[in-house]
Amino acid sequence: GPNLTTSVENLDPLSDYSVAPIPSNGILEVFGDMNGVKLKLLDGIGQVIKDYSLKQSVLILPEQSGIYYLRLIKDGKPVGSFKIIKF
């Protein structure tokens, strides 16, 4: 079967955004209107470990495998939340 390197679970089904792993280890692409959106990457215990710039739609995850959460914030409100498992 395919060699899964990253899995993404959408925690907010009503979100206008989606995230898909690019078929290489630890790279994600975010789909949706990124204007004014802030991206925060959290570790498994909810600590922010990386802030991504507003115009970025391709995100490179930390090298370490594990569970991460990606939060999308617009006008101070959460607009998307994704659980990412990096193998």
Image (cartoon, helix red, strand yellow):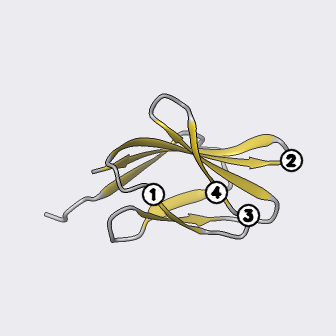
Sequence-wise, which precedes: disc 3 or disc 4?
4
Amino acid on which the number 2 mark rests in the picture:
Asp
Q: Is residue 87 left or right of residue 85?
A: left
Percent position of residue 62, x then y = 43, 55
In terms of secondary structure, where does tag 4 sit? loop
Question: Which is in the foreground here, disc 4 or disc 2?
Answer: 2
In this figure, which residue is indicated by the disc labeled 2? 75
Percent position of residue 26, x then y = 38, 61
In front here: 6 or 12? 6
| Relative vertical location of residue 22 with respect to residue 84 in this rendering, above or below | below
In front here: 14 or 54? 54
Q: Check the picture and name the quadrant holding the N terminus.
A: bottom left
Q: CA distance from mark 2 to mark 3?
A: 12 Å
Sequence-wise, which precedes: disc 2 or disc 3?
3
| Relative vertical location of residue 60 with respect to residue 7 in this rendering, above or below | below
Q: CA distance from mark 3 to mark 1?
A: 16 Å
